[in-house]
Image: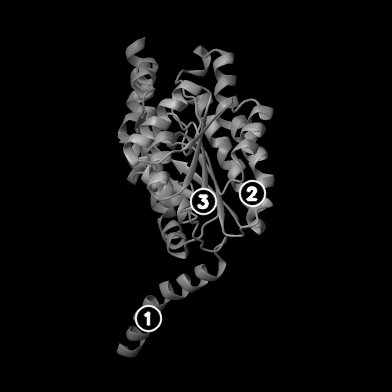
Amino acid sequence: MADSDLSFLALCALLPIFFLIFLKLIVRPRPVKVPIKSRHVFITGGSSGIGLAIARQAATEGARVTILARSLDKLEEAKTSIRLSTGIDVAIVSADVCDFEAVKAAVESAGPIDVLICNQGVFVAYELENQDMKEIKGMIDVNLIGTFNLVKAALPGMKNRSDRKPVSIAFMSSQAGQVGIYGYTAYSASKFGLRGLAEALQQEVIADNIHVSLIFPPDTDTPGFAEENKKKPQLTSIIAGSSGVMQSDEVAKKALNGIKSGSFFIPCNFEGFLLSLATAGLSPQRSYLMAFVEVISAGILRIAGLCFQWTWYGSIEKWHAQEK
């Protein structure tokens, strides 16, 4: 009896090890490191907020940085800000990401890109019924179509580079790109679209040693954040407010570290990490350890997700009951 108990305990101890070995054999793509020192990092939406913080961080780490935005005046201010804080000059280029020809010209003028960070974004929270179609289209054009334009323009140069070191394409999504929230119909649609783009694109470019990342920041203290809050439906603030607010520099550090490690999902806080586990689905995973965590936590996180949904729908029911 004692021998059978010992055998059972040994089997229980060995199963996780065998499972880890199995995961190490099957996870794809393989682990990679993407260097940024002395390489060209091209950042859109780089004149303020998260983009400016990433530009400053990348310049500090020795990258050659180009920032893109629409306003040349704001780009000049950003360039001066980075020079004053780091002593390093960055290149600036003005273009509207919704205009493919302008984006193509901007990318060509900047030269071959090693790390493309598509950080541009527009966010206005409203219920779909109350939101103007022009505003909806504007969010989708900037957040999603603008990203297609940037990738389409940069990809030929990235594929034909003489330096065959790993390179990266990173998309600034949002926690609203992991879960839909009341009032985020258009915004979430544009950010969820980035995931489909990223998953398919990674398969298309992996043979060229190009690695795709999705960054998921929560609400971030940027120049536009206070204005956004003034317009948010109250229900949106109630439901979305639990994740807290991060500073741009914190998000920038998380984003760059994730890009350098070749991570497909880059969460920026604990809630984002849990959402990444809960929504892993068929996304690529380079780390067999993270794959192990995803597998063993899937059922528990689904229960947690259902509890969150119960809370959110409870808030919605209560709100509408008070309104009547």
Is residue 53 at least partly visible in the picture?
yes
Q: Mark 2 vs mark 3: which is more N-terminal? A: 3
Q: Where residue 213 appears, x then y in whole percent?
A: 52, 48
Looking at the image, which is closer to me, 69 or 80?
A: 80
Between the residue at mark 2 and the residue at mark 3, the CA separation in whole angstroms equals 12 Å
Q: Mark 2 vs mark 1: which is more N-terminal? A: 1
Please, what secondary structure does the residue beneath circle 1 have? helix
Q: Mark 1 vs mark 3: which is more N-terminal? A: 1
Is residue 304 at least partly visible in the picture?
no
- Identify the residue at image location x=47%, y=52%: 36
Q: Is residue 87 left or right of residue 205?
A: left
Q: Assess whether mark 3 and mark 1 are in contact (beta carbons under 8 angstroms).
A: no
Between the residue at mark 2 and the residue at mark 1, the CA separation in whole angstroms equals 53 Å
Q: Is residue 203 left or right of residue 179?
A: right
- Identify the residue at image location x=46%, y=18%: 126
Q: Quadrant of residue 197?
A: top right
Please, what secondary structure does the residue beneath circle 2 have? helix
Amino acid type of the residue tagged 1 in the rendering? Phe
**In this picture, is 85 found above or below 315?**
below
- Identify the residue at image location x=44%, y=51%: 258
Q: Where residue 169 appears, x then y in whole percent?
A: 56, 46
Amino acid type of the residue tagged 2 in the rendering? Met
Q: Which mark lies nearer to you, 2 or 3?
A: 3
Looking at the image, which is closer to me, 15 or 160?
A: 160
Q: Residues within 10 Å of mark 1 (few under 14, many from 20)?
A: few
The residue tagged 2 is 158
**In this picture, is 82 found above or below 281?**
above
What label does residue 300 carry, if any?
none
Q: Where residue 304 appears, x then y in whole percent?
A: 37, 45
The residue tagged 1 is 8
The residue tagged 3 is 39
Please, what secondary structure does the residue beneath circle 3 have? loop
